[in-house]
């Protein structure tokens, strides 16, 4: 049967993938309250559409850190994509490039920065986990820079791995035929089998828990690439990110995989946008599954959004064609949302085009 929205890929992926892999992709932390909330919160925002505006031409193009892209929909870094499909990150890179948008490559990719660069032209960001061994970090950043990556997304919400109980039950580990390719030559490309989550043990052993604001400054001494701080959920940290020299902020709760009972990212967005005061662009990821979600994020001040799991699920189902379809469906839905709301360009999307349940004291049903 024909797939008509991006969420449908989840069911297909669940059927196709080994349980250990699907659970790793799908899980959130602990009670998974935030995982549900990332989706639910979008449904507490309604539209205030404007009518009788000529919407025969809709322009979704935008610029991110000076790079022109076709739409404000980008790809978040997700680890180990070759568990989903043999072409893994190559397929994602090609699909993003074909859609004219940005792919963020995970530090824990199963393809290296050089391999992904060799798939052809495209605007790509590199997501960085900071290892205890700073030589490893410096080398990796240099390689990403040389391979033509345009920005570093510095993940700041993972001093330790969140407790993902499915991974503990499944004793999750990277399948033996795959490696974390960026670390292959550094003897850090394999994950040991553990009594619990192999990834949690890997993080505990290798990732730097001491990471702090001074390291954001340190990173700027080893690279000229702009730095996006990924994992901001408060106004306080938005201000500190800017002080530390960030070129942008990604409001993210890591797909609800780190601290459970943090708010949905769409709930945290506006506070961060206000604190940023337009000094740097603010992006969002977490639970974006519809064109209406993209519009709501932009109406609350985001400059763009990133999607995580839908890429993994569509990769598992159909490889590159699947990821292309996900990007196309989300694009089409977003275009339709703009038309039906009376917005012809991204700059016409305003806070007045939505009403959120925190805007007024009475329940939405009575507005
Ligand atoms: C992630 N995410 C993530 N983030 C990051 O900075 N580095 C990484 O390696 C990964 N790996 C990863 C694996 C898997 C399986 C998932 C689901 C997520 C988080 C990711 O970048 C993003 O924040 C969320 O996925 C966005 O939420 P949605 O779109 O998945 O709901």
Image (cartoon, helix red, strand yellow):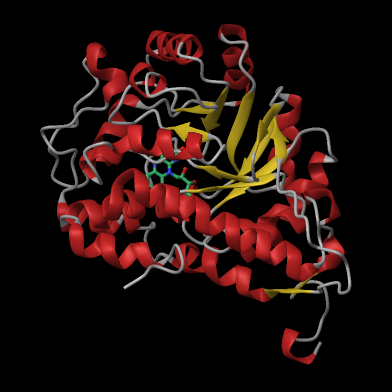
Give how far across and how far down residue 158 sits, in percent.
Answer: 45, 38
Q: Quadrant of ligand 1?
A: top left
The answer to which of 94 and 55 lies nearer the viewer is 55
- Is 27 displayed left or right of 364 in the figure? left
User: Which residue is at the far bottom?
Assistant: 366
Q: Residue at x 57, y 37 (%)?
A: 100
345, above or below 48, in the image: above
123, above or below 157, in the image: above
Callout count: 0
Q: Quadrant of residue 320?
A: top left
Q: Residue at x 34, y 55 (%)?
A: 313
Q: Residue at x 25, y 46 (%)?
A: 84
- Is 300 displayed left or right of 310 in the figure? right
Give how far across and how far down residue 233 sits, in percent.
Answer: 63, 48
User: Which residue is at the far front?
Assistant: 56
Q: Quadrant of the N terminus?
A: bottom left
- Is 329 displayed left or right of 293 in the figure? left
179, above or below 257, in the image: above
Residue 264 visible in the snapshot = no
Give how far across and how far down residue 15 sits, in percent.
Answer: 20, 65
99, above or below 46, in the image: above
Q: Residue at x 17, y 31 (%)?
A: 178
Residue 89 visible in the snapshot = yes
Q: Quadrant of the C terminus?
A: bottom right
Give how far across and how far down residue 78 sits, in percent.
Answer: 39, 41
The answer to which of 131 and 67 lies nearer the viewer is 67
Q: Quadrant of residue 6?
A: bottom left
- Is 67 displayed left or right of 201 in the figure? right
């Amino acid at each position: 049967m024909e797939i008509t929205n991006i969420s449908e890929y989840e069911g297909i992926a669940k059927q196709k993938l080994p349980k250990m892999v699907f659970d790793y992709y799908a899980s959130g932390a602990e009670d998974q309250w935030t995982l549900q909330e990332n989706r639910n919160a979008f449904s507490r925002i309604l539209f205030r559409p404007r009518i009788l505006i000529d919407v025969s031409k809709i322009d979704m193009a935008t610029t991110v850190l000076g790079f022109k892209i076709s739409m404000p929909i980008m790809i978040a870094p997700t680890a180990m994509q070759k568990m989903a499909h043999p072409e893994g990150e190559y397929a994602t890179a090609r699909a993003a490039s074909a859609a004219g948008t940005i792919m963020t490559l995970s530090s824990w990719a199963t393809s290296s920065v050089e391999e992904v660069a060799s798939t052809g032209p495209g605007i790509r960001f590199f997501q960085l986990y900071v290892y205890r061994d700073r030589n490893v970090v410096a080398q990796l950043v240099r390689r990403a820079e040389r391979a033509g990556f345009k920005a570093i997304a510095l993940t700041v919400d993972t001093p330790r791995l969140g407790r993902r109980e499915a991974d503990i039950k499944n004793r999750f580990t990277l399948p033996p035929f795959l490696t974390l390719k960026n670390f292959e030559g550094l003897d850090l490309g394999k994950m040991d089998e553990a009594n619990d989550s192999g990834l949690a043990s890997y993080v505990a052993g290798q990732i730097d828990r001491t990471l702090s604001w001074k390291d954001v400054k340190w990173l700027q001494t080893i690279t000229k690439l702009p730095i996006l701080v990924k994992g901001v959920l408060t106004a306080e940290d938005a201000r500190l990110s800017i002080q530390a020299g960030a070129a942008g902020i990604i409001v993210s709760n890591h797909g609800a995989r780190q601290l459970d009972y943090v708010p949905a990212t769409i709930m945290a967005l506006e506070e961060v946008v206000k604190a940023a005061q337009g000094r740097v662009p603010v992006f969002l990821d977490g639970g974006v599954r519809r064109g209406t979600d993209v519009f709501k994020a932009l109406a609350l001040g985001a400059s763009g959004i990133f999607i995580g799991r839908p890429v993994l699920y569509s990769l598992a189902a159909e490889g590159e064609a699947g990821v292309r379809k996900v990007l196309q469906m989300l694009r089409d839905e977003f275009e339709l949302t703009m038309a039906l709301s009376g917005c012809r360009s991204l700059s016409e999307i305003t806070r007045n085009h939505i009403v959120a349940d925190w805007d007024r004291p009475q329940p939405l049903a009575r507005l």
